[in-house]
Amino acid sequence: MLEVSHLSKAYQNNVILQDIQLSLAKNQVLSILGKSGSGKTTLLKILAGLEYPDEGDVKVDGQSVLKTPPHRRKIVYLYQESLLFPHLNVFENVAFGLKLQKQPKKRIQEKTNQLLDALGLGDQAHKMPHQISGGQKQRVSFGRALIIEPQLLLLDEPFGSLDPGTREQMQDLLKQMIAQYQITGMFVTHDIKEAMLMGNQIALMQNGQLRTFQSLNEFIEDKQTGAKAEIEFWKQYISP
């Protein structure tokens, strides 16, 4: 569904992305693991149309989208911050995209209520953003993205600002939503465990270069990922 070929980007003399190549099948999620400054966010911004590459191409369903404006790409980019509209309640935030599409009022009502229930927000519909928790705000943000049925969902460390317990709940919820709504997506994180949990595939971004692993075992065994070392570290605390 997504094909990225020979993508490069530099700011002045600072190379951010170097000859990035990747492909992503429909209904699959690619986890991209990498440290801050490795180029992960720049890659997502190019896919979303918020940045333009110096070289290379991005194709969705075989068609280049580089000249397509961001709002027409059917690609949604979610930040770590929920960025909800503060003057709209939960229902209105989630329904926003459908209203822009000028869908019938009854259709908006039914679809939004259905999604709010799936997100566990049915009883929060009339609350304002400042009246709900951080985890609930992130659920609203997911709802606003999912309701327009994007071709590709880009998640840029979406749980980074949440406490560990809420973060685990949101990981479980997103996994459920990915399965239920057949999402195709890319999940950026610097957390090894989260990368293994959220993706069907895993890739490692280092110094602007991307390596996609063929299997979870290959990812774990590669010393550059740090996965095996982390697993061994935690084993000493959970072993009988």
Image (cartoon, rainbow, N blue to C red):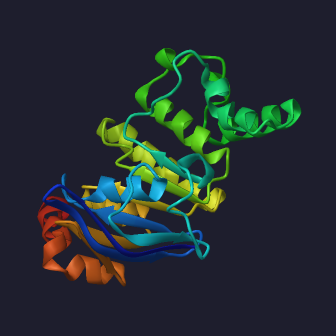
In front of the other: 47 or 201: 47
**Which quadrant, please, contains the N terminus?**
bottom right
Closer to the camera in the image, 70 or 129: 70
Residue 64, quarter of picture: bottom right
Q: Quadrant of residue 140?
A: top right
- Spot occupied by residue 223 in the image (x, y as percentages of width and height): 13, 77
Query: Looking at the image, is 240 positioned above or below residue 96?
Result: below
Residue positioned 44% across, 71% down in the render: 57
The answer to which image quadrant residue 145 occupies is: top right
Q: Where in the figure is residue 218, as x and y percent of width and height?
A: 28, 83
Given residues 196 and 112, the one toward you in this image is: 112
Quadrant (top left/top right/bottom left/bottom right) for the C terminus: bottom left
Q: Is residue 162 above or below residue 45?
A: above
Compared with 214, 206 (above or below) is above
Position of 144 compared to 173: left or right?
right
Image coords of residue 110 (percent x, y) = 81, 36
Q: Residue at left 56%, top 16%?
A: 128
